[in-house]
Image (cartoon, rainbow, N blue to C red):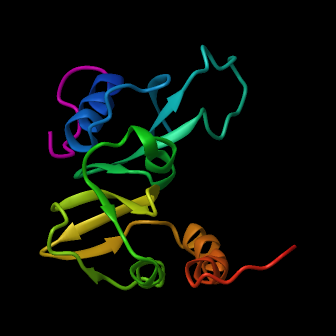
Amino acid sequence: MGGSLRSSGSWDEVARGYLRERFGVEELPGRVVERARGLWLTTADLVPEGVKVHSVGVRLFYLQGKGLKPASFGLSFLGERIRRRRVEVTLEELERLLLGQAVEKPTAPEGYVALAYRGDVIGCGKAKEGKLSAEISKARRRELLSALPWEKRREGGAHHSS
């Protein structure tokens, strides 16, 4: 499927096929709908007429002219269901990625991947020619960077009481 936009079938089918093929996700807890230049996972049956809604669930993909781009929050939400294209990073690599730098990952599969730290999917990454970069919004990067001092203390074995 390679991220191409749908040529036939529903967006639900396209999203499920992409997630199954790329990330090994076998089941989604809801249905996929198109809204606001994206594909969203929702359990809502309907949105009442005339009601302005910003989002209808969890964004799984951004719709781009060249194809689908996985949304970091969607990958994080599906974290335990993702069986393929998970790239585990160290704390040092995570910090560099969040600062906008690429890291060497020659074994990472080309294209979009699920970035994982200590087994938890933290967002979307992209691998190209052995280099890995983060495809995470600047706001989310700042949030994650602010948590790194605690993580560094934890990895260093330091204990503190609250």
Q: Nearer the viewer, residue 144 or 119?
A: 119
Q: Residue at x 65, y 75 (%)?
A: 147
Question: Does 64 sit above or below residue 98?
Answer: above
Q: Which residue, as the protein is rendered here, is positioned at the far top?
A: 45
Q: Quadrant of residue 145?
A: bottom right
Q: Residue at x 22, y 43 (%)?
A: 22
Q: Which residue, as the protein is rendered here, is positioned at the far right?
A: 162
Picture coordinates of residue 109 (x, y %)? 16, 60
Highlighted magenta segment, given as a residue range: 1-10
**Magenta stretch: helix, strand or loop mostly:** loop
Picture coordinates of residue 134 (x, y %)? 38, 71
Picture coordinates of residue 66 (x, y %)? 22, 52
Left or right, residue 151 beside residue 50 = left
Q: Nearer the viewer, residue 70 or 132?
A: 132
Q: Is residue 63 magenta?
A: no
Left or right, residue 143 beside residue 60 = right
Q: Quadrant of residue 127?
A: bottom left
Q: Residue at x 42, y 82 (%)?
A: 100
Left or right, residue 81 beside residue 154 = left
Question: Does 136 sit above or below residue 154?
Answer: above
How many marks the image carries: the answer is 0
Q: Quadrant of the N terminus?
A: top left
Q: Quadrant of residue 124?
A: bottom left
Picture coordinates of residue 139 (x, y %)? 60, 70
Q: Quadrant of the C terminus?
A: bottom right
Q: Is residue 4 magenta?
A: yes
